[in-house]
Amino acid sequence: MHKLNHMSSLLLYLSFLFYLLFSSSSSSLNNSSMLAAAVSECQRAPSAGETKRCVGSVEDMIDFSISVLGHNVVVRTTENMEGSKKDVLIRKVSRINGGKVTKSVSCHQSLFPYLLYYCHSVLKVRVYEADILDPKTKAKINHGVAICHVDTSSWSAGHVAFMALVQVRVKLRYVTGSLS
């Protein structure tokens, strides 16, 4: 089980407090709530079957990944931000490990005044890669990675992943309805 060590935890809180004390812009309240969410996520106890760590460097990200997966790892990442929050087409979906349940580590960038990633590994996931295309030109604009959780039974109904999924389903229904 990996957590932030006491010194990292203290630095995280001090950075957060420093930011709050010396930010005077009108967007500070929005930013401070995002920072509070990042601190909260890093300090939260792992879910059942989850191994997690918040890291502030690529070296720490590698160390965590090796501690979970061993030395024989393949790095997969979404290539860029192109297509984010836009309509896109998905093509050439590849099932990693033949679509079988596999072990993985995913790292999510947190909104914080310095580099901070929330890295975690959960049991029972499937990993996919796909090309992301511009819907008008059909040109490839990105290559993405998706990690699908097979067992979410221990998650609360308000889990952030469920909230995101609801938004995607609503958008898919809208797009499907508008095509008929």
Image (cartoon, rainbow, N blue to C red):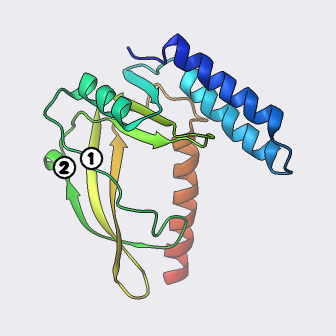
Q: Residue at x 52, y 58 (%)?
A: 169
Q: Secondary structure at mark 2?
A: helix
Check residue 99 in the rendering and tell me which mark sits there, or answer none.
none
Q: Position of residue 168 (x, y in %)?
A: 52, 58
What's the amino acid at mark 2?
Ile
80 vs 51: above or below: below
Give the quarter of the image for residue 29: top right
* Rendering coords of residue 177 (x, y %): 54, 76
All told, the count of numbered labels is 2
Element type at mark 1: strand
| Mark 1 neighbour density, 10 Å: few (under 14) some (14–19) many (20 or more) | many
Splitting the image into 4 quarters, where does residue 44 fall?
Answer: top right
Q: Judge left or right: residue 3 versus residue 131.
A: right
Percent coordinates x, y for residue 23 in the rendering = 81, 41
Label 1 close to label 2 by CB (< 8 Å): yes
Q: Which residue: 46% across, 25% down?
A: 154
Q: Label 1 sits on what residue type?
A: Val
* Quadrant of the frame with the N terminus: top left
Residue depicted at 40% across the width and 17% down the height: 2
Which residue has dot 1 on it? Answer: 127
Q: Residues within 10 Å of mark 2 (few under 14, many from 20)?
A: some
Disc 1 or 2, which lies upstream in sequence? Answer: 2
For marks 1 and 2, give the CA distance. Answer: 5 Å
Residue that lies at the very extreme toward the top in this rendered image = 6
Q: Is residue 123 among what the camera can see?
A: no
Residue 126 vs residue 17, the one in the foreground: 17
Left-right relation of 66 to 72: right
User: Compared to 122, does 95 lie above or below?
Assistant: below
Q: Could you tell me if residue 126 is visible in this image? A: yes
Q: Residue at x 34, y 33 (%)?
A: 59
User: In the shown orientation, is residue 79 left or right of residue 82?
Assistant: left
Q: Please give the label number shown on residue 96.
A: 2
